[in-house]
Image: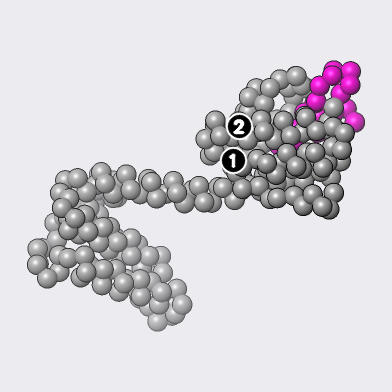
Amino acid sequence: MSVFERVIETSANKPYNSARNTPQWVLGKVMEEVGECSKAINMPERCDESAFNEAIDVIISSIDLAREIHLDEGGTSGSFEDRLEETIKLKNDKWRKVIFEKRWEEIFNNAIQKVIEQGKQSYCSEAIECLYRHPDGLKCIVGHMINDDHYKPEYEGLSVGDVYEAVIKSKPDLKFMERGRLLEILRKLQDAHDNSSVDFVKEFSKKVNEIDLINLKKIDLSEL
């Protein structure tokens, strides 16, 4: 039996009391536990229980509250566990997206800045193509996202999709982004690099500003 199953079983088998088996009453207990947790955090010397233990009480009472709300909405006791698991997954995915979205933006923005700082395209006239890593030390934008440990010379000439594994191994946070979305962003960034030439930095920056698949930092073209 999982921890959640044990908590749900305890909630389901508590003595019935028409005055206490309501969302309003259980909410009061949750707030009481939150108050005790707050006290344990801010005044631990005046508490018998640790802040950690009080936080667990908040979780347990919150699950009991969720069950009372579920029943109050017409749900059955048997269907609560599935609803709880499904909703926790949805909410957790939402928080993961908020957390990782910022990290993803930082990875892309750092690579964009490195391309702007190098000031020129990583282009090889002999191969008549852009390179992930140029012999002169230049890198294309995807090249800036591949660490030394994961780069291989044989990547040159391959598509962004072919170096996908090298990118997510170099930038592990990107593995949490949906593969199709990540590849589309990488292709658009690579296109901005590969198809900017005459006034490279300005052309590249303008194309990057047009990418709307993720909230990239806008580049001030007037400063270029």
Q: Main secondary structure of the magenta part?
A: loop
In the rendered view, tell whether residue 145 sits above or below residue 92. above
Q: Quadrant of residue 162?
A: top right
**Judging from the image, what secondary structure is the residue with disc 2 in?**
helix
Viewer can see residue 36: yes
Whole-percent x, y for residue 137 in the image: 87, 33
Residue range of the region highlighted in magenta in the rendering: 124-145
* Residue in view at x 12 percent, y 70 percent: 19
Whether residue 31 sits left or right of residue 205 in the image: it is left
* Residue in view at x 31 percent, y 65 percent: 57
Whole-percent x, y for residue 49 in the image: 36, 72
Q: Nearer the viewer, residue 92 or 55?
A: 92
| Residue receiving disc 1 | 213
Crowd band around label 1 with a 10 angstrom C-alpha radius: few (<14), some (14–19), many (20+): few
* Residue in view at x 21 percent, y 69 percent: 24
In the rendered view, tell whether residue 52 sits above or below residue 102. below
Give the residue type at disc 1.
Leu
Q: Which mark is residue 184?
A: 2
